[in-house]
Image (tube, coloured by chain):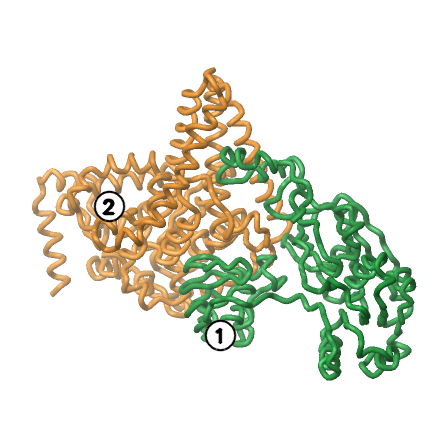
Amino acid sequence: MAIDNIKAYSHLTDEDIREIGRRLDAIKEEFESDLGEKDVRYIKGLIRTQRYIEFAGRGALLFSGRRPFWIAGVALLSLSKILENLEIGHNVMHGQWDWMNDPEIHSSTWEWDNVCPSSQWMHTHNFAHHKYTNILGMDTDVGYGVLRVTRDRKWNAMHAFQPLINATLASLFQWAVGFYDVELGKLAAGRTTWKETAPKFWETVRKAGTQGLRDYVLYPALSGPNFMSTVSANATANFVRSVWAYAVIFCGHFPDEAETFTKEQWKNETHDEWYLRQMLGSANFRGGKILTILSGNLNYQIEHHIYPDMPSNRLAEIGTRVEAICREFDLPYNTDSFPAQLLKVQRTLLKLSVPNEYLAADRDNAPEVRSNAVWSKYPEVAEKLWVGASETGERSGLRTALPLLEQVRPTLKEGLLNFTGRTPEWRKKVAAAEAAQLA
Amino acid sequence: MPTSPDGLASVRGILRRFTTPLLPDDYTMLVNPLWSRRELRGKIVSVERFPDDTIHLTIRPGWGVPVDFQAGQYIGIGLRVDGRFTWRSYSLTNAPDTSDGLFSITIRAVEKGKLSNHLIGTAKPGINVRLAAPAGDFYLTDPLPEKILFVTAGSGVTPVIAMLRSLEEKRQSTDITVVHSVRNADDVIFGDVLADYDAHIQVTSEQGRVSPAVLEELVPDYADRVVYACGPATMLDELENWAKDNDMEIRVERFTLDRASDAKGGTITFARANVETTADGATTILEAGEQAGVQMPFGCRMGICQTCVRELVDGHVHDLRTGDTKEPGSRIRTCVGVAAGDVVIDA
């Protein structure tokens, strides 16, 4: 059912939410005023390194007919494309480096190595996704229009093929991104005209054309007799980058316990509640320095969503502050290892390929979605919680609640039995609970 | 327009196919920072220091910098200070005919002059800077007026020095008078050039400032002359009024923006500040904000430095420098952007 009142759901008082907002504003100010030469050296060094790696990769692939060169070339080019898209392109286009006033590293001029024109990306991503994060019906990143990532979304026949669609999306991720803002689906549904769609459509086609010409004609031609092996190498590098970007991005909002929201929540939202929505709607994963850079610092998805235009190299440090705030206010700080988060995402995608009646957990307390109704539905959990801090300063809020809610969810065994239709009584129990709530 | 040599001029089109979405320059500049025409660049080749916190710089432009200029025009210099590019305009002091493709500028320490003070402190040969092409409409007309009166104060003398240097060969045919003000006698820069033209040097701490009355006394035939003036804004205002009263032609340097466009203006909403104001198509969003009490960051106020960039949340904004119309969601330069209809700015 998703969350329609974040304050009530998170067991915080108005003053708590204002205090969290104040502290987050202060952190922003503190870090922004500290930006300087050190940060410039980081981004410029990274860009230089990425271009050398790309040069080396393209160079190795001139001899792609020989196996070791093919392998080295693919590795270097994939690495270069990953750095370029995630840690450089995505972050520059967010305006994270605009403070340097350098037109060469600026959101208004950056064009990335991706079939998606940066202007379109900045509209769907920076504007729609970052502003309306995880609001059903407003943030199209919730499932990207083709996947069912929450049982709040109505099942249709297409979702039966979800595992297949999921794999296709992962391998062709840049193409999905490229045609995302073109909104062909809207055109098919008759909600817009070809005349309005055409400029963006042709813009993407043109960009895809120049990208394709480079990767599949020019560099292969340059490698002479190794034409075909360079084509396969470049295609592999694009594939590796797509799958990697997919994995990182899906770990940002779809692991268990990341929250979704209704339009109701958005309508009455304050600036401080916006922060809270970003914190509850995003998920991190742990990683060392290398994993962090390769994922464009998006393993600090929570921090990135709180401060979308904060230079990425600062997010790790900010992370420790945000985590401390979460602990203090008994709020969850969703993080786990990279494989664990990815596994949770894949489990959700697989599960949701079947209609809701085959799913045991209800829409108010499922791994991927919860709602405000959960507290009246599970009084045994609600009675252990309270709003704000007690007289002794103790809290028992959402962070305490989530593991308790997990305990009252159907177990794997119950889920399987339900799926195979052997426990009709479970479904009756759920229906009865829902009826009781309505009454 | 003549530009400095560009090593990739003939092959850039082909290389671009290989480097897309970047430019060949994005790679060549890794070898030599001057090898890029994506942004105009230059390298400081000589630094001459003077005791009173004044320096003369000579700059060799990188690939593709327009080197054709009129005596009296300025160039923009951009340098990173604490990680941020900071820009200022400096008048060129060399004569176009003898410049050899180099740019000469003179910088004087000023109070709160972030870039000037930084340059004076750190400039040395070999340092790379960003450049903005020569610009400005403060230069001598062709044909030359028969009689000219130059009125300058402090470092306002610099564009006039370029003019005087370029007049070197034509001085027989033109009658030139120079009146220059300095606070103290040892503040005079370019003393040799000024002496060459028998300039009147007014030391204001001793003799008082150069008012129109003083000028009328110093230059009896003032009414026959075309006035070229450069100095503090108050002085320029006073001289403009004086010229108007006496029906004289006057040209001054004010570093301004051409505001003509088709944009019709509209209501500007500053979303964060929660302030609404209306502005016409010649008032920039930055100015409209300032008038309504919304202080946004700014740098050069000429559309060069990108300090003032803000997100356009809704509506369309017309960019006075490029003539482009910006769509919702794009990031706009508020110092050169005017409202084309109602707009909402994230500020």
**Label 2: few (<14), some (14–19) or many (≥20) C-alpha neighbours in 10 Å:** many
Give the residue at x 91% y 62%: B196
Q: Amino acid at mark 1?
A: Ala
The label on residue A148 is: 2
Give the residue at x 24% y 34%: A164
Res B286 visible: yes
The x, y position of residue A170, in whole percent, is: 33, 36
The x, y position of residue B95, in whole percent, is: 79, 54
Foreground mark, 2 or 1, reads 1
Q: In which image quadrant can residue A263 be found?
A: bottom left
Give the residue at x 46% y 16%: A225
What is the drawing colour of chain A? Answer: orange
Q: Amino acid at mark 2?
A: Arg
The x, y position of residue A90, in whole percent, is: 46, 46
Res B209 visible: no
Which one is nearer the viewer's eye here, B176 or B10? B176
Above or below residue A48? Residue B154 is below
The x, y position of residue B265, in whole percent, is: 46, 71
**Label 1: few (<14), some (14–19) or many (≥20) C-alpha neighbours in 10 Å:** many
The chain letter corresponding to green is B
Q: Which residue is mark 1?
A: B279
Whether discs 2 and 1 lie on one chain: the answer is no
